[in-house]
Amino acid sequence: MLVVLSHAGLTVVPGGSGVTIFFVISGFIITHLLLRELEKTNSFDIRGFYLRRALKIFPPLLVIAR
């Protein structure tokens, strides 16, 4: 929504704030997923975590990047 407001000429917050907000939200989500795995299995597999992320991200990327 901030992007729409910015393009409409209404600068509510500084331009780079969207990137910061994205990284903060991403950090919370990744931490939540890792803590949930730690709670379920009493450990976490960082390679498995990134493999699952890649398997979710790459198929749509390959379709779009054709």
Image (cartoon, rainbow, N blue to C red):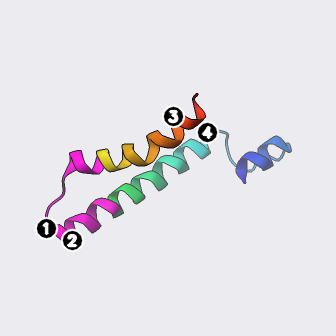
Asked if disc 2 and disc 1 are in contact, CB closer than 8 Å, the reply is yes
Residue 56 position, x and y percent, is: 43, 49
| Spatial separation of the CA atoms under disc 4 and disc 3 | 29 Å
| Residue type, mark 4 in image | Gly
| Residue type, mark 2 in image | Glu
What is the secondary structure assignment of the residue under circle 1? loop
First to last magenta residue range: 33-50
Tell me which residue sits at (67%, 39%) in the image. Answer: 15
Residue at the right extreme of this rendering: 8
Asked if disc 4 and disc 3 are in contact, CB closer than 8 Å, the reply is no
Query: Which of these two is toward me, 65 or 44?
Result: 65
Q: Of circles 1 and 4, which is in front?
A: 1
Few, some or many C-alpha atoms within 10 Å of disc 3 (few <14, some 14-19, many ≥20)?
Answer: few
Magenta residues, dominant SS class? helix
Image quarter in which the C terminus is found: top right
Few, some or many C-alpha atoms within 10 Å of disc 1 (few <14, some 14-19, many ≥20)?
Answer: few
| Spatial separation of the CA atoms under disc 2 and disc 4 | 35 Å
Q: Find residue 43 and report its image quarter.
A: bottom left
Asked if disc 1 and disc 4 are in contact, CB closer than 8 Å, the reply is no
Q: Is residue 36 magenta?
A: yes
Tell me which residue sits at (53%, 45%) in the image. Answer: 20
| Spatial separation of the CA atoms under disc 1 and disc 4 | 38 Å
What is the secondary structure assignment of the residue under circle 2? helix
Q: Which residue is mark 2?
A: 39
Q: Which mark is residue 62?
A: 3
Q: Which residue is mark 4?
A: 16
Few, some or many C-alpha atoms within 10 Å of disc 2 (few <14, some 14-19, many ≥20)?
Answer: few
